[in-house]
C-alpha cells in the first residue's frame, strides 16, 4: 500500500473514532465489536422488563380484565429473586465446569429460565383471565410460575453478564463499559416498548401469544450471540477448580473495612429515594397540574433525556479521575433540588417548573446509578466481581420494587385521609398525597448523603482512568 493510501486510511479511522460513540472504550483484547455483542444481554433484560412491568401490566388489566391487585402481585413476583443476586454472583465467582468457564454457564441458565417463563406465560394468562373456567386456579399457578421463572432468569443473566464485563474490561475502561451497558439497557427498553406497542395495536389473544413467544425466541438468540466466545476456556481452572468458600465467609472478607457495607446502604436509600415516584409522576402531572395524556407521556422522554445527559457527564467526570463516590453524592444532592422543584411546581401551578424538575430527576438518578455501579465495580477486585455486582444489583432491585409499592400505597392512604378531612382544612387537595411521597424521597436522599458523604470525603480514587476524546455527549 502506498503512503498516500496509508494516510487516507488513517484519516478515515480517526474520523470513525470521532463520530462513533464508545469507540474509545475498545482495547486490543476487548474490541468494540466484541463489547457491543456482549452488551446484547442487556437488550434481552430490557425487553423482559418492559414486557413484565409495562405491556403485560396494561394488557392484563384492560384487555383481559384481570383484577388489579392480582396483576400487581404477579408483576412484583420477579422481585422475589432480587435479594439472591449476591449469592448468584458469589457462586459464579467459584463455578466449577469442565472447560473452566465461570460466567457463561450462568448467563445460559438465566436465558433458559427466561425462555421457559415466556413459553408458558401466554397460555397461563389466557386461562387466568377466564374467571368462569373451572381450571382458573391453574392459570393463577401457571402465571405465578411464569413470572417467577422470567424474574429468576433476568436477575441471573444480568448479574453474570455484568460480572463478565468486569472480568473482561481493563480497570481504566470500566466507567465507559458501565455507561455502554447502561445505554444498551435504556435503548433495549425504548425499542422494545415501541415495538410491542406497534404490534399490539389491534389486540387479540392470538397476537398476545405470538408476541410473548417471539420474546422467548429473541431472548435466546440475543443471549447466545452475546455470550458466544466471550469467556476463554481455562484448562488449569478446569483441572484444579478453586474451592468455593462459604458465602458468609466471603461476604465478611468483601465487606471488611465497612466501605462495601456503607456503599450498599447508600445504594438502598438512594435507589428508594429516586424510584418511589416512578409510578406517580404522570398521575401527579395530570391530577395536580391538569396536564393532558400526551403531555404526561412526554415526561418519560424528559426522564430519559436527563439520564443520557447524566451518562455524558459521568463519562467525562470519571475519565478525568473523578471519584465514583463523589459522583454518587452529587447525584443525590441534585435529586434534592429536583424533588423540591416538583413540589414547588404545584404551589405556583407551573408546568414548566415541573418539567424542569422531571429532567433533573432523570439527570440526578443517572449520576447516582452510574456512580454507585462504578464504585461496586472498583470493589470487585480479587476475583469477587460476581459478589460485588450481585450485591449491588440485589440492593438496587429490591429497594426499587419495595419503594414503588410503598409510594403507591402511601399516596393512596394520605390522599384518602386528606379527602376525608382528617388532616385538617389546609390539607384537602389531591396534591397532599403526592407531596407527602416526595417529602419522604427527600428524607431518603438526605439519608443517602449522610451514609455516603464520609466515603466521598475520605476516598482517594486510586483507580487510573484514561482520558477520553469520544464521550457520551456525542451520542447521535
Image (cartoon, rainbow, N blue to C red):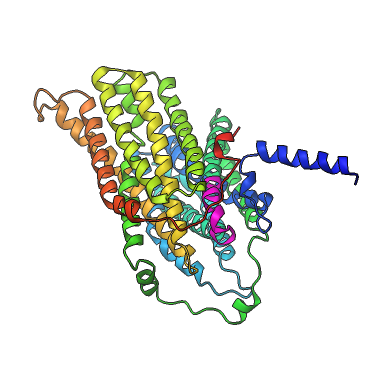
Residue 446 percent location from the top left of the image:
25, 43
State the image quarter where residue 102 is shown: bottom right
Relative placement, left or right, of 135 versus 439 is: right
Report whether residue 125 is seen: yes
Closer-to-camera residue (156/388): 388
Residue 172 percent location from the top left of the image:
55, 55
Residue span colored magenta: 166-181
Q: Would you place residue 351 above or below residue 276 in this image?
A: above
Q: Would you place residue 121 above or below residue 237 in this image?
A: above
Residue 189 percent location from the top left of the image:
52, 40
Q: Does the magenta-highlighted stretch encompass residue 172?
A: yes
Q: Residue, x 33% and y 66% (percent of image)?
A: 257
State the image quarter where residue 99 is shown: bottom right
Q: Residue, x 14% and y 26% (percent of image)?
A: 427
Closer-to-camera residue (72/450): 450
Q: Would you place residue 349 above or below residue 69 in this image?
A: above
Amino acid at each position: 500500500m502506498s503512503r498516500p493510501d496509508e494516510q487516507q486510511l488513517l484519516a478515515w479511522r480517526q474520523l470513525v473514532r470521532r463520530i462513533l460513540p464508545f469507540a474509545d472504550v475498545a482495547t486490543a483484547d476487548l474490541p468494540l465489536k466484541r463489547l457491543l455483542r456482549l452488551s446484547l444481554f442487556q437488550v434481552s433484560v430490557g425487553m423482559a422488563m418492559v414486557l413484565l412491568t409495562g405491556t403485560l401490566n396494561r394488557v392484563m388489566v384492560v384487555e383481559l380484565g384481570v383484577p388489579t391487585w392480582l396483576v400487581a402481585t404477579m408483576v412484583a413476583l420477579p422481585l422475589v429473586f432480587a435479594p439472591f443476586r449476591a449469592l448468584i454472583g458469589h457462586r459464579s465467582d467459584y463455578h466449577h465446569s469442565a472447560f473452566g468457564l465461570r460466567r457463561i454457564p450462568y448467563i445460559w441458565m438465566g436465558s433458559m429460565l427466561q425462555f421457559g417463563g415466556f413459553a408458558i406465560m401466554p397460555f397461563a394468562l389466557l386461562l387466568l383471565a377466564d374467571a368462569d373456567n373451572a381450571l382458573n386456579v391453574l392459570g393463577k399457578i401457571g402465571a405465578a410460575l411464569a413470572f417467577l421463572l422470567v424474574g429468576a432468569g433476568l436477575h441471573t443473566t444480568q448479574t453474570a453478564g455484568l460480572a463478565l464485563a468486569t472480568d473482561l474490561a481493563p480497570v481504566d475502561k470500566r466507567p465507559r463499559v458501565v455507561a455502554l451497558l447502561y445505554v444498551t439497557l435504556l435503548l433495549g427498553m425504548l425499542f422494545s416498548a415501541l415495538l410491542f406497542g406497534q404490534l399490539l395495536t389491534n389486540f387479540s389473544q392470538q397476537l398476545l401469544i405470538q408476541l410473548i413467544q417471539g420474546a422467548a425466541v429473541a431472548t435466546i438468540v440475543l443471549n447466545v450471540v452475546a455470550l458466544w466466545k466471550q469467556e476463554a476456556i481455562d484448562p488449569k481452572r478446569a483441572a484444579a477448580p478453586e474451592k468455593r468458600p462459604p458465602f458468609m465467609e466471603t461476604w465478611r472478607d468483601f465487606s471488611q473495612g465497612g466501605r462495601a457495607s456503607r456503599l450498599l446502604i447508600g445504594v438502598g436509600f438512594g435507589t428508594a429515594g429516586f424510584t418511589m415516584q416512578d409510578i406517580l409522576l404522570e398521575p401527579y402531572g395530570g391530577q395536580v397540574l391538569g396536564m393532558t395524556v400526551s403531555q404526561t407521556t412526554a415526561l418519560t422522554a424528559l426522564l430519559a433525556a436527563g439520564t443520557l445527559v447524566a451518562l455524558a457527564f459521568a463519562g467525562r467526570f470519571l475519565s478525568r479521575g473523578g471519584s465514583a463516590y463523589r459522583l454518587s453524592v452529587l447525584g443525590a444532592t441534585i435529586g434534592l433540588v429536583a424533588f423540591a422543584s416538583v413540589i414547588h411546581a404545584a404551589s405556583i401551578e407551573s408546568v414548566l417548573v415541573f418539567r424542569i424538575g422531571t429532567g433533573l430527576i432523570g439527570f440526578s438518578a443517572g449520576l447516582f446509578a452510574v456512580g454507585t455501579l462504578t464504585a461496586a465495580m472498583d470493589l470487585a477486585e480479587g476475583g469477587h466481581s460476581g459478589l460485588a455486582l450481585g450485591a449491588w444489583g440485589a440492593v438496587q432491585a429490591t429497594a426499587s420494587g419495595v419503594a414503588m409499592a410503598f409510594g403507591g400505597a402511601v399516596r393512596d392512604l394520605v390522599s384518602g385521609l386528606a379527602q376525608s378531612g382528617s388532616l385538617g382544612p389546609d390539607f384537602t387537595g389531591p396534591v397532599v398525597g403526592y407531596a407527602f411521597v416526595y417529602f419522604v424521597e427527600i428524607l431518603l436522599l438526605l439519608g443517602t448523603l449522610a451514609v455516603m458523604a464520609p466515603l466521598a470525603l475520605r476516598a482517594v480514587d486510586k483507580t487510573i482512568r484514561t482520558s477520553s476524546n469520544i464521550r457520551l455527549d456525542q451520542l447521535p
